[in-house]
Amino acid sequence: MKRGFDAGGVTPRAIVAEGAFPQLAKLSIDLTGAQLTRDDRLRSFSGADSGIVSAEQFEMFGEPLYFEKAAVEARLEGKSVEMRLTGDPQVGSLVLKQAESGTVSVKAAIEALEGLLQSLAAEAASKQGIEVKKTKLTLTQEGPRAVAFRAEVTAKVFIMSAALALTGKLEIDDDFNARLSSLGLDGDAMVTNLAGGFLKPRLQQLEGRVFPLLAILPSGLHLRDIQVVVGPALQIQARFGGAA
């Protein structure tokens, strides 16, 4: 199982199985410290199933794992779980078959998101001679699955400081994908005009783009009660298993 994760570019810190395989009392997969980028996906393996693995208690977590250097806490917990092991028994992937009950949670502190935005903005702006000095992120709840955001960036252009704001909306769909929409720029006219030339094409690429939040978790999850919660952290949570 560990080889399957390794082949997908994600190395677990530990995999602990309690009980007699394949009917386990507990299966715990610790991904803490894993480094992910926006292009990473947990690899799926083709081929016949190589067996069923069951666990009275199942957990898979990274506390934290790192997405583009931002610390993110991700946790999946399930009770009375059955999973198919697909592909080669030595290098395979888990597919959830059924569960009595379970929860999924992905959480990132606002400060971590601000740091991520600043690093991405600084990378793009430096090519245009713009120095990003500070980033402040404000989130506003817009329904159970959506949040509006405003990222205010203070930048140095030549010898002057100027402010630029990126606005938009983040929505979570039935498959736990995050989708960006209504992206726009406003702020000081000078820096908006200067930055808009290279940022607007990038925003057009991001408009409607889907980011799969379950990319490193087992496939086969059928989620319900998906909810976005805004506070000191942005948390996205859902349930699975049992009766719908």
Image (spheres, rainbow, N blue to C red):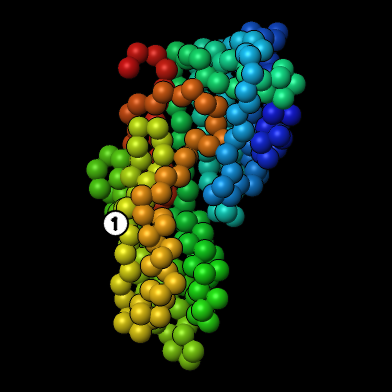
- Quadrant of the frame with the N terminus: top right
Q: Residue furthest bottom?
A: 159
Residue 130, relative to residue 27: is it above or below?
Answer: below
Horizontal arrangement in the rendering, residue 146 relative to residue 117 (left or right): left
Per the image, the residue denoted by label 1 is 182
Q: Is residue 27 visible?
A: no
Residue 113 location in percent, x, y? 47, 56
In this view, the residue in front, 58 or 244, is: 244
Q: Position of residue 126 (x, y in %)?
A: 55, 76
Residue 197: quadrant of the picture = bottom left
- Residue shown at 72%/17% (left/top)? 89
Under circle 1, the secondary element is strand
**Residue 53 placed where, x, y %?**
62, 12
Amino acid type at mark 1: Ser
The percent coordinates of residue 86 (x first, y second) are: 63, 19
Badge 1 crowding class, 10 Å Cα cut-off, few under 14, some 14 to 19, many 20 or more, is: few
